[in-house]
Image: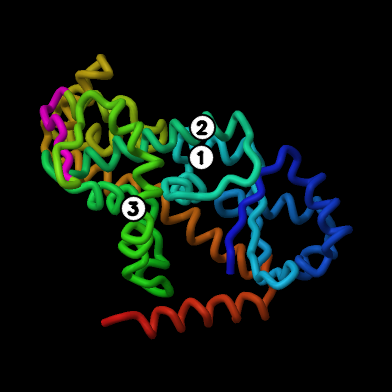
Amino acid sequence: MIDFIFAVGHTQHWHSLNINQNRKHYSYLGTLGSGAVTMLQENLGAGVYYNPYVKIDDMMIKYGVVSIDKMCKDLLNWETLYLAGRMHKPVKILKDDPRVRLAQQVNLASALRTALLLLPKDFTEEILYTTISSLSYKGDFRTYFGENPNKIKNVVSKQMKQFNLLYGGLIQGLPTVNFVANGMLQQDDSPKAKAQMIQKLPRVLKHKIQEEHRMVLASKGIQWPIDDLEACKSIVNSGNYIEYINTSLKEIVFRPTLSQSLKGILTAGLSKSVKYTSSKIGKWISRPQ
């Protein structure tokens, strides 16, 4: 089943037209009209409305609908990582939008910086892309039940060339990391370099990391640094910044992923939900041990 995301300017208008033209794509919620569909889409989960198991000609697809504004906010700020995380991996863009294109470049740079913060001084290109691909799975309950545990590894190993096309230019543009030889990379792991990367992380992730460290400092009676770079240096020098990043990513991902999955029961309908869940369970049971 091929996965599509439609980023649209006006979601209610789009759903109104689509319900009239493709009523069978929707569950019983379609009878309530585009207003109800849009309200559910915008107020629960990650702002995406999915219609799964839609047959177009001889192709089975599922498609999600999201507003361009919501998509750009997630790409820039990592509010849920639901869409931003998907776009850390190679995707096929069918129709370009300048706002999304610019936000996506920021998203890719953010993913690269976050992965570098989690990695040691020396690492392979494949490990870099695997780390990037794993960011949006931290805190995702589906990784413990219903997803192939080798999914990330398979995604990267089969698309190394595509990942290189996606991130190669960004890597070369960063002064703190370089390709060495034979698929190896090396980065500047000094506290200053790491602090500068934390400074440039997406707004939501950076705020959560700072709150984690702020609580530690407060418990020790230490005042929070006024200067932003000094605050980021304090985070790095604490030695806990990797733990802060992982904890913060889990907090960002968990709730939207769970509520989006619960929303899927309503948007897909009971029969399609059972079919989709059974498919996931089947893959999980038949996974390599």
Give the labeled residue for mark 1: 74
Q: Is residue 52 above or below residue 6?
A: below
The mark that comes first in sequence, 1 or 3, is 1
Residue at the image point whose x is 40% and y is 37% from the top: 108
Amino acid type at circle 2 is Ala
User: Which is more foreground, mark 1 or mark 2?
Assistant: 2
Judge whether residue 188 is colored magenta: yes
Q: Inspect this view and state whether residue 139 appears.
A: no
Residue at the image point whose x is 64% and y is 66% from the top: 61
Q: CA distance from mark 1 to mark 2?
A: 9 Å
Q: Quadrant of residue 209?
A: top left
Give the labeled residue for mark 2: 103
Where residue 264 appears, x then y in whole percent? Answer: 61, 65
Residue at the image point whose x is 70% and y is 72% from the top: 58
Where residue 86 appears, x then y in whole percent? Answer: 47, 51
Where residue 261 appears, x then y in whole percent? Answer: 54, 64
Q: Is residue 19 above or below residue 38?
A: below
The mark that comes first in sequence, 3 or 2, is 2
Give the labeled residue for mark 3: 160
Amino acid type at circle 1 is Asp
Q: Inspect this view and state whether residue 271 appears.
A: yes
Task: Give, as a single range, the part of the protein colored magenta.
Answer: 184-192
Q: Residue furthest right?
A: 20
